[in-house]
Amino acid sequence: MKYFQKYNNCIYCGSSKLKKEKNQIHPKNFYVDAIKSDLNLSQKQLNKIIVHCCLNCHILQNNPWFKKEVSRRIYSNIYGQHNRSWTNLINFVKNGKLPDHGELYKILSKNIKIKNYAEYNSPFMGLFLNFFKEECKNNKPFYKNLSNKVFDYFNFRQVAGKSKILQKKYLEKSIKSYSDILNLKKKNLKKKNLKKKYLFIDNSNLFWGQNDNYKSVNSKSFATEFLDLEILNYHKNIKTKSFDLFGIFHTLDHTFEPKKILDFALKSSKVVIIYCHADKTVNKQHLFTFTSDFIKYLNKNKINTFDLTNKIKKTFKSKELYFICSRKRTYLNKFKKSFEKKIEK
């Protein structure tokens, strides 16, 4: 078991009641192909990874699975770039196309007065681009111009190994690029619409981190300048800020502490929106995934939920969940009533 270790307890609730799943299917994908190649694993070795169901909280979990240090290597070296996240950003910059969350942003904005918004660990998977588009004047070339200037700014600051003459030249160009960034934003952003936006990171061994780069720029660094985010380091003793909405978009299954992350979000925000896989299979690059029955577990544990999966009219549908949750039922009542009125009409 050079690369593997036992995960005999549920990664979410800690239960030891893990039942082996029958008729398991492990689809191949480019992540698995890269892992096999770089770790020199045979299919026989990969087949040692077995899917189990937690009989308590109903998540699906691989056991055994990769050791934490191997997991970090997978998400930092073997496939260090979060392909889907960057693709969302590229599509937005080139075509003004937002990530496909259907009418989710419209529904949330209608039912919550959002002034302070936070997300966890991935800047281009959730709603930051929606907020940014709303903050901008109707000017698509602005996205591309701003993106180019942000990349220029960071790339001109990379001067290691350059001569003193080039370092001076790059410094002058970086200063010019940053000045252009400020001027572009001044001309194209609506001051009245600006929201306070935060991205919490925790450097999890189960998430794309220091090598989540495109054009030699890290996603978090790019997001701070392009989207005007404030990066905050999550840890269990952090002094919580107060948010109107907290988004967790395909990141709750990319941490070894999913319960702590969700508890933190619920403690610091009125409402939490979660988007996650809800598949009957667990790809081998994932330690675990959620199921539709996970919502029932949350309800039993006094976390109020409202399933939006079939209400957001998403174009592309796959095996996934969209649901909002809160410690206080009153925060979700407005959502429920708004959909009840639609049915009555």
Image (cartoon, grey):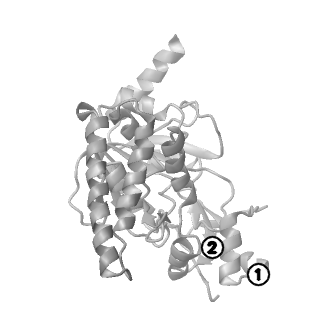
Q: Is residue 310 left or right of residue 138?
A: right
Q: Secondary structure at mark 1?
A: loop
Q: Position of residue 95 (x, y in %)?
A: 53, 39
Residue at 65% in and 61% down: 282
In depth, the one of 196 and 321 nearer the eye is 196
What residue does disc 1 label? 42
Amino acid type at mark 1: Ser
Which residue is depicted at the point 46% across and 69% down?
256
Q: Would you say 283 lies left or right of 227 here?
A: right
Image coords of residue 144 (percent x, y): 45, 45
Q: Type of residue at label 2?
A: Asn
Q: Residue at x 32, y 56 (%)?
A: 177
Give the farthest residue toward the top: 345
Q: In the rendered image, which residue does mark 2 sit on? A: 63
Q: Quadrant of the N terminus?
A: bottom right
Farthest residue to the bottom: give it: 2
Q: Is residue 32 left or right of residue 92?
A: right
- Closer to the camera, 227 or 268? 227
Q: Tell us which disc is closer to us: 2 or 1.
A: 1
Give the vertical position of 133 relative to 147 (above or below).
Answer: above
Q: Earlier in the sequence, mark 2 or mark 1?
A: 1
**Residue 110 appears in which quarter of the rendering?**
top left
Residue 14: image location, x then y, percent: 48, 67
Q: Is residue 241 visible?
A: yes
Q: Are marks 2 and 1 in contact (CB under 8 Å)?
A: no
Label 2 crowding class (10 Å Cα cut-off): few <14, some 14-19, many 20+?
Answer: many
Q: Residue at x 56, y 44 (%)?
A: 321
Q: Secondary structure at mark 2?
A: strand
In this view, 254 is above or below 244: below
How busy is the neighbourhood of tag 1: few (under 14 within 10 Å), some, or many (20 plus)? few
